[in-house]
Amino acid sequence: MNRQISRQGSPAETGVPPRESTNSESIHTAPLSNRGALGDGALPSNSDHTFTPINPLFHRSIPPSILPQSQIKSLINTAEPVFYLTMQSAPDSTPPPASTEFERTPVPESHQKPARSFWGMYAGEHTAGTEFVIGPLFLAAGVSAFDMVWGLLLGNLMAVLSWRYLCAPIATRTRVTLYYQLEQVAGRKFIIAYNMANGILFCILAGAMITVAATAVGVAPFVDVRMPELTDRAPTGIAWIFAVLIIGGIFSWIAARGYDMVARVANIAAPWMILIFLVAGITTLPKLGIENLSQFWEASQTIIWNGIPHEGHIKFTFWHVFFFAWFCNAAVHVGLADMSILRFARKASYGWASAAGMYIGHFMAWISASMLYALHLQQNPGDTSVLPGPMAFEALGLAGLLCVIVAGWTTANPTIYRAGLAFQAIFPKRSRFVVTLATGGLATFAGLFPAFAMQLLDFVGLYGMILAPIGAILLVDYFIFPKMRLLPNYAALRNASFNPAVVVAWTVSLAVGFVFFKQGVFPSFLTLPVWLLCGLIYVLYTRYLLRK
């Protein structure tokens, strides 16, 4: 017996805000036990409501607004029959929320963005400050020319596919943030702990971008400002602190203005910044002794990516480059943090816009940055420090210097915005502007410490391994559970503040990942197995709880 009760679940069942109805015949359901919420099963004398008995051993359909329509079947886990009151309801006349960021409601059609907003944002975000560090770190790890080029081509392809076919579909169907969706599945108690960890990690990443931008003061007339080296962990002086605070304050204010402001900055800066990276690579070629493109491949294997790691660095292979390119943004594509961005997309196909960031930023820009570092090593033998500001200034002058600042800007902005949404979920009554501004302050504090930027490869791998598994849980819950006739949105539908299956799946998979990391395994190698393990444990433990 599999009965269709209603077209739309009630807010009490789903735990989500009611969606504005355009159909006057829409039906809501409200559960009434045998003794009834109205007292001993009684109804008002003028009631003409209809009751439908439900066998608790079977499923009933509850297609709430944030779940797949006509797919979700929720398990009625009770020992006695339950009656559901069906009634006709008028269209929802609730006024729209005052905020246009929709932190806890689905994004309405009127606020969805065109494709150009996403192409520009992804190109700007990923053609960014990190590229000035990651490119040189690949070279320092002794990657060969073949492994660099093919590893980036294929790894970035996998990243784009992850955005398009994992993150974009769930984002454009639910139209809510990762944090709100996770609250429906995992419960309020879990979301507080997760969002705190998520926000802090995003703040550290944004702080690394602020560090990169602050290296722009390492040239005339500020040559006396001591720049951080690869081994530095703490601030290098008062002048460095002052530079970071100014740059971090500007970045934070932009992010606090909201998604519209973030997208506007990206669209303005991206074309110019992409051109600067391209010109940097081209103008570096003759300085490296490469006179024409026909000489590039042969010369690159000896002059740029010679396959010899610097002292203290492990040797990188094709697989290091491939998995790092795929999972350096694991938290935002397979980890679904970009639901916060792609919920504004009109179509799931806008996930292809991530290709702008991957192949312009994580291919062309990483290669150009490697070439800048190779030129720096050629002109300054023995100086292995990675300083984006001075490197770009040596190649392109003032334009290169501005590029370093703007590149850090366009990455830090959306990262601080995402972190602000994470903290907003913890403090929902606080203004998003104030929360995001405070988040920017935390990111600026992290930017004072150059260790996060100078050890970026390991940090990015770890942060992806920690946050990405939550994406596996949400994808399984949203797409797989309905097909397995398992209960999705556990916390919302049961009004629970805690989902033990989520905690067990996340903690056990992370514990396994950290065991291998402690054994010296490159963290980007661990992201995929930890992600898959987390989803598998979530399914198995949920089935165990239902049987129990």
Image (cartoon, rainbow, N blue to C red):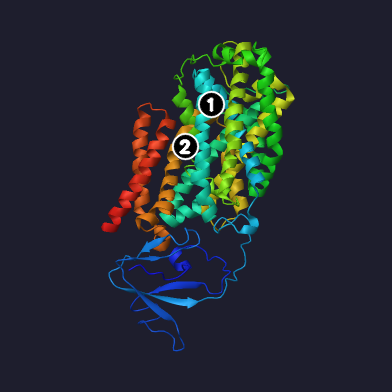
| Of residues 184 and 144, the one drawn nearer to the viewer in this rendering | 144
Q: Label 1: few (<14), some or many (≥20) within 10 Å?
A: many
Residue 200 at x, y percent in the picture: 50, 42
Instruction: Give the amino acid type for the residue marked by disc 1 in the picture.
Output: Met
Q: Quadrant of the N terminus?
A: bottom left
Identify which residue is drawn at 43% across, 53% down.
478
**Against 169, is 409 above or below?**
above
Residue 150 relative to residue 368: left or right? left
Residue 167 is at least partly visible in this image: yes
User: Which mark, by number, is residue 463?
Assistant: 2
**Against 139, is 274 above or below?**
below
Q: Are marks 2 and 1 in contact (CB under 8 Å)?
A: no
Query: In terms of secondary structure, where does tag 2 sit?
Result: helix
Residue 151 at x, y percent in the picture: 50, 26
| Of residues 353 and 491, the one drawn nearer to the viewer in this rendering | 353
Instruction: Give the amino acid type for the residue marked by disc 2 in the picture.
Output: Tyr
Q: Quadrant of the C terminus?
A: bottom left
Identify which residue is drawn at 47% across, 68% down.
7
Residue 227 is at least partly visible in this image: no
Distance from label 2 to label 1 (Cα)?
A: 15 Å
Q: Label 2: few (<14), some or many (≥20) within 10 Å?
A: many
Residue position for label 1: 454
Residue 460 relative to residue 514: left or right? right
The first of marks 2 and 1 along the sequence is 1
Query: Which residue occupies the extreme left position in the image?
Result: 548
Q: In front: mark 2 or mark 1?
A: 2
Query: Which residue occupies the extreme bottom position in the image?
Result: 45
Residue 385 at x, y percent in the picture: 57, 19
